[in-house]
Amino acid sequence: MPIVPVAALASASSTSAPTVAAAPSPTAVAAFEQTLFGSGAVVPERALAGVVHDLAVSTRSPVGAGALLDSPERMLSAQSALHRTLLDVEVTARVAGAIGQAINKLVSLQ
């Protein structure tokens, strides 16, 4: 085995360009998503966007017109609905955060 000076090894390693992985093709991305989420499943971002949209639509009510201010029972039911909506949004945000952390962990493992 020949003896090679360390300086020669260092200069040889610094002249070689670092290799960069090519971006995956759209068909490879689609195949990966199908494997990850199943064939008929909806991507989590789309499902969460649908939930947030449904919550936004369900919270539209004529509060500004004074319709809820005529009785304490209606005011309490409106408050309860608002609390439920806020809780639903918080749970959705926590689930989305957990999914994002899991995806980041999986990506960093590769």
Image: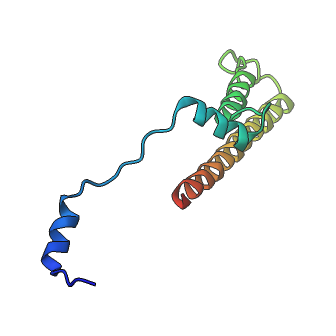
Residue 5: percent from left, percent from top: 15, 81
Residue 95: percent from left, percent from top: 69, 48
Tell me what residue is drawn at x 41 percent, y 47 percent.
21
Q: Which colour scheme appears in the figure?
A: rainbow
Left or right: residue 48 versus residue 68 is left
Tell me what residue is drawn at x 72 percent, y 41 percent.
35
Q: Looking at the image, is 60 positioned above or below residue 29?
A: above
Q: Residue 62's image quarter? A: top right
- For the C terminus, the image quarter is bottom right
Residue 44 seen? no
Residue 16: percent from left, percent from top: 23, 57
Q: Residue furthest right?
A: 73
Tell me what residue is drawn at x 68 percent, y 34 percent.
43
Q: Looking at the image, which is closer to me, 10 or 68? A: 10
Q: Looking at the image, is 67 positioned above or below residue 84?
A: above
Q: Residue 80's image quarter? A: top right
Residue 66: percent from left, percent from top: 71, 18
Q: Looking at the image, is 90 positioned above or below residue 74?
A: below
Left or right: residue 33 versus residue 1 is right
